[in-house]
Image (cartoon, helix red, strand yellow):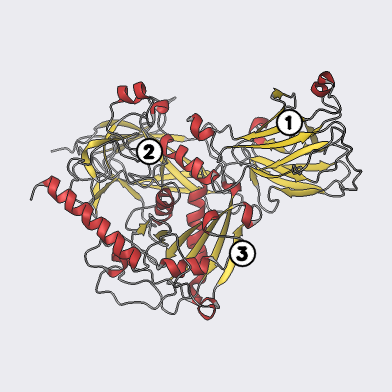
Amino acid sequence: MTAQRRIRVRRGVARLLAGLLIAAGLVGTGTAAAGAPAAAETGGATVVPVQTTGPADRRFNLVVLGDGYTAAELPLFRADLERHLSTLWSIEPFASYRSYINVWAVEIPSKDSGVDCDPALDAPARDTALDMGFWGGCNPDSVQRLLTVNSAKAGGYADLVPGTRQANRQIVALAHSSTYGGAGGSYATASGGNALSALITPHELGHSLGGLQDEYDYYARGVPGGRYEDEGEPASAHHTLLTEDQLRERHAKWWRWLGEESESGGPIGRYEGGLYSTQGVWRPSRHSMMKTLGYAFDQVEREVMTQAISAKVDLVQGHTPNTAPIGADRTVWVDTLHPVGGELAVSWRLDGRRLRTDGARTIDLRELRDLRELRLTPGRRYELTATVTDPTPFVRDPAVRGSAALTRTVRWTVDPAATTPVDLTRAEFTGHTATGTPVGARSVVYVDTSHPVRRLPVVRWTLDGRPVPNPGNALDLDLGSLRLSPGVHILTARLDGAARELRWMVDASPASGAYQLSEPVRTVRRPGRPVEYVYDGAFDLRLTAQDDQQGVVVSQFRVDGDGWYTYYGWPTDATAPFRLSPSGTVIDDLVYGKLGRSRAVPWDDATPDYGTHTVEHRTVDAAGNISRPRTFLVTLEPPRP
């Protein structure tokens, strides 16, 4: 049988298997009503709010279910969840849009510990609430790492979280297992305790939430995928048959990002392999998260994920009622969401003429100079609009920027003859960035306020007791623009007329990181240069971190300016150091730790990159602070005879 024929058969088997799994209720289809667990079955489950950024019906809700954890093992589920979330918040765009997301844990005590067919098909079946299992639900024609969940039962347990529904949530099921595995679909799954499992979760969310495709150049591990045979341009946003020149000429796919240094390493361009094929199809970057766990989403994937997250919420959370004309003698307001990574932009127009409002969320029609110049005429009506846009640099496609996910417009009819009744609304805070945990030095901190119709809300910010100017949009304060000195700072917000003051601790000191290496052949120290370690073969790298605040710290490293790679220990043991070697180490038909030019699969170039390499490492703490990279050199010499 030819390689091409094997690929066609393999894809057909994969589609058939997926259909069988869906029919059996083992993976998500988006319909959780049929077969949902009865009330008695869900009686032992407990819904725990892990992160609350707003009402469930106005947020994107990440609902995490645990399976195979007995009642005594639920603390382990909580620890696994914390590690998975800490890694997720270190990855863009989840880091910048964390404030859009509520996280709920549904703790479900299982009768048995573990999940089905773990790690082998002959492993005993376990009695668990979600029927999770490896091998595609114990299917001998599947693959070991395919970890499935009973979608009907998962949907039933997720329904226990008030205010969530399929349109505003994403289910993630964590299995009590240290075996590598996961799956993407309507619901995402991952093993809870594998060394790489915290990186499986964002990869599977790439599938489940963003509709991203695998960039693997194989389907069965250890077997090259052959040539891509499907006709026509792939529907995938991050795969193409076009050349770079054709991408530019046709303004197709990722043409706007071409040539830019990739967030995941190497310039954005055209790299052969993806969609389970080795040849004939190309991806944007050398090794993004959808190809190799440990790297970031590249810019193309990050744009897709930004739109996917934003589409789960409404940028406009509330506004002055607009069902009837309003008078010109009042304030008009919009409440918006507040990304951690940057402020939303708000522009106001009257009959299409832009008003000078400096991005304010509330305007007083009586005080706007533009309106006085226009001299509104009684008997005539005017259209007032407020357009809320996310100016994130993560998005370059105007169609994405202009979509409902990133742009919303509210309209009012203004009647100068209308008179607004006096109201008794008191000035008070109605929402704000959480005050119970430190905020990072680059975060945007926000407050929401009530809306008296006769006066503007005046918010006064202070940092360490000193006033902080914040013109225009006074509700968001971008700490990154203040360039805070290292240490702990106290930020306060006071609303004129309100009784209480809000207070935050600002953590402006990143976690400190350290490295340990196995014994080198020799160590070289030269003035003005980083320390250099010389090896003639494999060596171990261990990264550790310390922080003066609570929370998990994520460590990362990169070689020769390549993409930052999340440190997780070693694929077979999270407590072991990461091994770097001239050609890399093959584990389960994947390659880890080649020093120099990366290598992901056995058929990639294994030629050792002898010579000197620059290694950098850094930390990302729980508040989102990223440390300055620290550098050392490694010189790899050929083995001596």
Residue located farthest toward the front when viewing the structure as drawn: 379
Q: Name above or below for residue 233 compared with residue 21.
A: above
Q: Name above or below for residue 266 compared with residue 180.
A: above
**Crowd rating for badge 3 (residues with CA inside 10 Å; few <14, some 14–19, many 20+):** few
Q: Which mark is residue 622?
A: none
Q: Where is mark 2, residue-wise?
A: 237
Residue at point 90% right, 48% down? 424
Residue located farthest toward the left when viewing the structure as drawn: 1
Q: Where is mark 3, residue-wise?
A: 162
Helix, strand, or loop for circle 1?
strand
Q: Where is mark 1, residue-wise?
A: 383
- Cα separation, mark 1 vs mark 2, equals 38 Å
- Cα separation, mark 1 vs mark 3, equals 38 Å
Which picture quadrant has residue 125? bottom left
For this rendering, which residue is in front, 505 or 609? 505
Q: Label 3 near label 2: C-beta < 8 Å?
A: no
Helix, strand, or loop for circle 2?
loop
Q: Quick one: label 1 or label 2, which is nearer the N terminus?
A: 2
Q: Quick one: label 1 or label 3, which is nearer the N terminus?
A: 3
Nearest to viewer (mark 1 / mark 3): 1
Q: Label 2 near label 1: C-beta < 8 Å?
A: no
Does residue 160 appear left or right of residue 386 in this picture? left
Q: Amino acid at mark 2?
A: Ala
Q: Name above or below for residue 542 compared with residue 140.
A: above
Q: Amino acid at mark 3?
A: Pro
Residue at point 76% right, 42% down? 320
Residue 402 in the image, given as x and y percentages of width and height? 54, 33
Residue at point 46% right, 49% down? 544
Residue 324 in the image, given as x and y percentages of width and height? 78, 42
Q: Amino acid at mark 1?
A: Glu
Residue 378 in the image, given as x and y percentages of width and height? 86, 27
